[in-house]
Image (tube, helix red, strand yellow):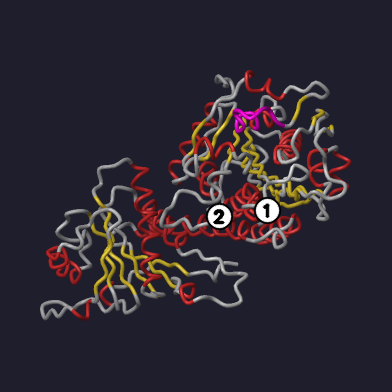
């Protein structure tokens, strides 16, 4: 969907002999030489460059020079057409900041390569950077590949500025780091980045180009490729199971609903983590219609489902051990058709709770509630995590910089928060409690689907909490971060693919929950 896929490999080729478009080296602030002994020719040029005063190795600084323009009879110069110096700043910050600095550096390299139309690159890793070799490689690869993302699927012709070259062949040189660790990190970064790009692709496609059927087909595709177990519950099955939330939201749509299920199984003896992602492929608001201005962005309302499905792709590719993972994506449109759900209607969710509909634009919680209740009853997970572009209120509270986190288990919340920080996808925890839940009381049903205008993100989470019981559960409201996320060199405008790397990092480092510990 995005413009082809780049190749990335590790090489032990002498950087001076690389004759491609761009040789990339990293420089710490105020360093007199590079930390790699194999870059003697660049080291000879560095003092001259710093003497000019245009480059000092500060964070985010870059400098491109053309080695053939620098004559040197004492030592061979690099054969590359260009040399790009990338500043790393000073290493006096926290470890997660250093991880993010490398991702940002990778994204910066992608932008610089685009500017000079460089397709073939050799990147020499920084040997003395204060992370282990695998993390150095992984974070840089994430920045490179995510920064190289473009989506031109629907362009029949490209403007001149859109024709800028993408990196096609990227080689990593260990630069003195342990080769096996570099290779391991490179593969992890590649698998995670490809999954994020897949999630971006899904979200970039319009409502008529990505439907519930497409969710099902993509799940089928990755399952066949990676050995995942896959099934889809069609409308008739949803009716038999009593999934009144999904069915009610779907009433106005010509597209039939689906509950897509993908399973990654390691051993029956291991615990299961359940992932649930909102797959609302277009949200008009239903009868409670959204304002026309900006409604086209509601094609992104399936970003939670995209993140969960793409995470399963990465989980299978990296062969996570120690945990089983099951993903559910309730998929439908929310449209104002002749049979559409109406304010005042009463529906019955999976499990029997009755719900008074106050606002048909509060539809995400209806489809998520069915999936949560069914998933917990069917798979008996140790924990459940859901991702959804659920409320505009979370943007009011946190802007586009933090994902809202609400949870009934402190350990699960802590693990998620740490995974988010490590991935550069920060979370901010909001409270839950009976004082918020009572805002959902209804006079005519068990509950209503919205509260008043206050605490909209929290009351939406309270609604979901009604369907998880005592199971450790965390809800990620990604409405503010799934698109227009904090501007970064490796995050494009539009869909960010948020949540994929956080979930993969969490499950790669999963710590069993102490269920006797205090819950919120």
Residue linked to disc 1: 228
Left or right, 332 with reference to 484: right
Residue 125: % across, % down:
31, 60
Quadrant of residue 15 within the rendered picture: bottom left
227 versus 372 height, above or below = below
324 is within the stretch colored magenta: no
Left or right, 321 with reference to 207: left
Please tell me which residue is depicted at 62% across the width and 33% down the height of the picture.
383
- On the rendered image, what quadrant is the C terminus found in? top right
Observer-nearest residue: 493 or 469?
493
Q: Please, what secondary structure does the residue beneath circle 1 have?
A: loop
Quadrant of residue 326 within the rendered picture: top right
Residue 258: % across, % down:
78, 50
* Disc 2 crowd, CA 10 A, few/some/many (<14, 14-19, 20+): many
Residue linked to disc 2: 495
Magenta extent: 450-460
Query: Are dots 2 and 1 in contact, CB under 8 Å?
Result: no
Quadrant of residue 182 within the rendered picture: bottom left
383 versus 443 height, above or below = below
Q: Please, what secondary structure does the residue beneath circle 2 have?
A: loop
């Amino acid at each position: 969907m995005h413009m082809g896929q780049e190749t990335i490999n590790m090489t032990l080729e002498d950087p001076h002999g690389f004759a491609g478009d761009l040789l990339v080296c990293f420089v710490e602030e105020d360093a007199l030489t590079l930390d790699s002994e194999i870059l003697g020719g660049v080291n000879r040029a560095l003092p001259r460059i710093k003497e000019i005063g245009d480059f000092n190795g500060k964070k985010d600084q870059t400098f491109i020079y053309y080695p053939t323009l620098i004559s040197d009879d004492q030592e061979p110069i690099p054969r590359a057409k260009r040399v790009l110096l990338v500043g790393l700043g000073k290493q006096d910050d926290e470890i997660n900041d250093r991880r993010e600095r490398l991702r940002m550096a990778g994204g910066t390299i992608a932008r610089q390569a685009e500017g000079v139309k460089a397709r073939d690159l050799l990147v020499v890793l920084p040997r003395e950077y204060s992370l282990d070799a695998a993390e150095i490689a992984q974070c840089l690869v994430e920045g490179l590949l995510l920064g190289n993302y473009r989506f031109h699927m629907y362009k029949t012709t490209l403007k001149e500025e859109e024709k800028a070259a993408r990196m096609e062949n990227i080689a990593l040189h260990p630069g003195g780091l342990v080769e096996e660790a570099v290779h391991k990190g490179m593969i992890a970064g590649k698998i995670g980045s490809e999954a994020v790009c897949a999630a971006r692709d899904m979200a970039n496609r319009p409502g008529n180009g990505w439907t519930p059927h497409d969710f099902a087909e993509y799940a089928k595709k990755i399952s066949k490729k990676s050995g995942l177990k896959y099934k889809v519950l069609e409308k008739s099955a949803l009716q038999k199971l009593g999934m009144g939330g999904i069915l009610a939201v779907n009433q106005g749509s010509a597209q039939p609903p689906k509950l897509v299920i993908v399973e990654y199984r390691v051993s029956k003896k291991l615990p299961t983590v359940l992932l649930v992602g909102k797959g609302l492929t277009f949200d008009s608001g239903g009868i409670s219609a959204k304002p026309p201005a900006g409604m086209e962005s509601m094609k992104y309302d399936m970003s939670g489902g995209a993140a969960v499905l793409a995470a399963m792709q990465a989980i299978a590719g990296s062969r996570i051990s120690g945990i089983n993972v099951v993903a559910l994506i309730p998929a439908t449109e929310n449209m104002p058709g002749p049979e559409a759900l109406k304010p005042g209607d009463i529906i019955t969710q999976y499990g029997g709770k009755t719900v008074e509909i106050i606002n048909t634009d509060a539809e995400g919680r209806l489809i998520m509630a069915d999936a949560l209740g069914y998933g917990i009853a069917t798979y008996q997970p140790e924990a459940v995590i859901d991702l959804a572009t659920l409320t505009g209120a979370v943007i009011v509270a946190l802007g586009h910089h933090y994902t809202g986190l609400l949870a009934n288990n402190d350990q699960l919340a802590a693990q998620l928060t740490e995974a988010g920080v490590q991935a550069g996808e920060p979370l901010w925890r909001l409270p839950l409690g009976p004082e918020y839940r009572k805002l959902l009381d209804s006079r005519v049903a068990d509950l209503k689907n919205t509260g008043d205008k206050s605490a909209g993100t929290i009351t939406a989470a309270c609604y979901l909490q009604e369907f998880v019981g005592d199971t450790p559960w965390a809800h990620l409201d990604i409405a503010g971060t799934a698109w227009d996320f904090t501007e970064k060199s490796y995050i494009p405008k539009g869909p960010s693919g948020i949540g994929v790397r956080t979930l993969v990092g969490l499950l790669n480092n999963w710590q069993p929950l102490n269920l006797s510990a205090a819950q919120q």
